[in-house]
Each structure stands twice: as structure tokens, then as C-alpha cells.
Image (cartoon, grey):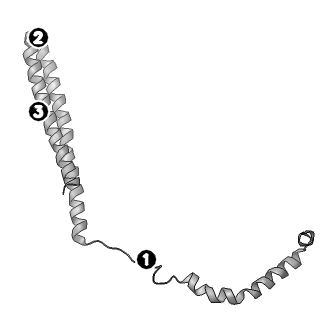
Amino acid sequence: MASITRLSLASTSALCRLLVNRNAGLIQQHLPSMIIPSAAQQRSIVTTPIRRDIDSAAKYIGAGAATVGVAGAGAGIGTVFGSLVVAYARNPSLKQQLFSYAILGFALSEAMGLFCLMMAFMLLFAF
């Protein structure tokens, strides 16, 4: 072990040259198979039909367009409760009747938003 550690730089490079020359035949024999993969190792490119790509793009566009209706539901709910505040300020004695109308308007606006969201999910996952 001690003799190996005492090798000079020149003897180390000579030892490397000896090992390379000895294994040159093995390297040249196996080098082509390492560089060029065999037919079993090569990957082929997988393409999808154009029709399927167009259908999936149409699904995403339709789902995005259907989701816009959720923003309309939010605006409708804001309008309903804004009108409730204005109506209550004008006539406080109709508080109970105005509130029941506001809840009805809220439910209808929310239902429309949920229908839009349901259509978006159906376009994405059912078709």
C-alpha cells in the first residue's frame, strides 16, 4: 500500500497509458453499442390525431366561456343587495317584505352562477 502512494506523477500517467492500451480492444468492441442505441431502446414520437386536439381545445374554450357566467352571478348578487339597501333607506317600514324579495333575487342569481359552473365542469369532464 505504501508503494502505491509513493508513485510519482510520471509513473501514474504511465500506468494510465498501460491500462488504456490494455483495454483499448474492449472499448472499441463495445463503443458502437454504447453510442448508437439499438432499435428496442429508441423511442418513437407519438402523435395524436388532429381531431382529438381540436376537440380538447374546444372543450377548454367552452369551459372558459361558461365560467364567465359566474362573474355575472357575483355582479347580480351585488346589485340585489345594493338595491335592498337603497329600498330600505327609502321605506324602512317594508323591511321584511324587501328582505324576502332580496333573498329570492340572491337565490336566483346564485343558481344561475352555479348552472354556469356546472356546465363548465360538464364540458371538461363529461364530454
Question: Does dot 3 land on a helix, a strand or a loop?
Answer: helix
Q: CA distance from mark 3 to mark 2?
A: 24 Å
Mark 3, residue position: 108
Foreground pick, 57 / 118? 118
In the rendered image, the vertical position of residue 32 relative to residue 43, given as above or below = below
Question: Does dot 1 land on a helix, a strand or a loop?
Answer: loop
User: Residue sitting at 21 percent across and 57 percent down?
Assistant: 59
Instruction: Tell me whether circle 1 and circle 3 mark residues in contact (CB < 8 Å).
Output: no
Q: Earlier in the sequence, mark 2 or mark 1?
A: 1
Q: Nearer the viewer, mark 3 or mark 2?
A: 3
State the quadrant of the N terminus.
Answer: bottom right
Q: Nearer the viewer, mark 2 or mark 1?
A: 1
Mark 2 is surrounded, within 10 Å at the Cα level, by few (under 14), some (14 to 19) or many (20 or more) other residues, namely: few
In the rendered image, the vertical position of residue 83 relative to residue 122, given as above or below = above
Mark 1 is surrounded, within 10 Å at the Cα level, by few (under 14), some (14 to 19) or many (20 or more) other residues, namely: few
User: Residue sitting at 14 percent across and 36 percent down?
Assistant: 111
User: Residue sitting at 22 percent across and 55 percent down?
Assistant: 61
Q: Residue 75 location in percent, x, y?
A: 19, 34
Amino acid type, mark 3 = Leu
Q: Earlier in the sequence, mark 1 or mark 3?
A: 1
Q: Nearer the viewer, mark 1 or mark 3?
A: 1
* Side (left or right) of 87 relative to 46: left
Mark 2, residue position: 92
Q: Earlier in the sequence, mark 3 or mark 2?
A: 2
Foreground pick, 16 / 65? 16
Q: CA distance from mark 2 to mark 1?
A: 76 Å
Mark 1, residue position: 43
User: Residue sitting at 71 percent across and 88 percent down?
Assistant: 24
Q: CA distance from mark 1 to mark 3?
A: 55 Å
Q: Residue 58 location in percent, x, y?
A: 20, 60
Question: Does dot 2 land on a helix, a strand or a loop?
Answer: helix
In the rendered image, the vertical position of residue 119 relative to residue 50, given as above or below = above
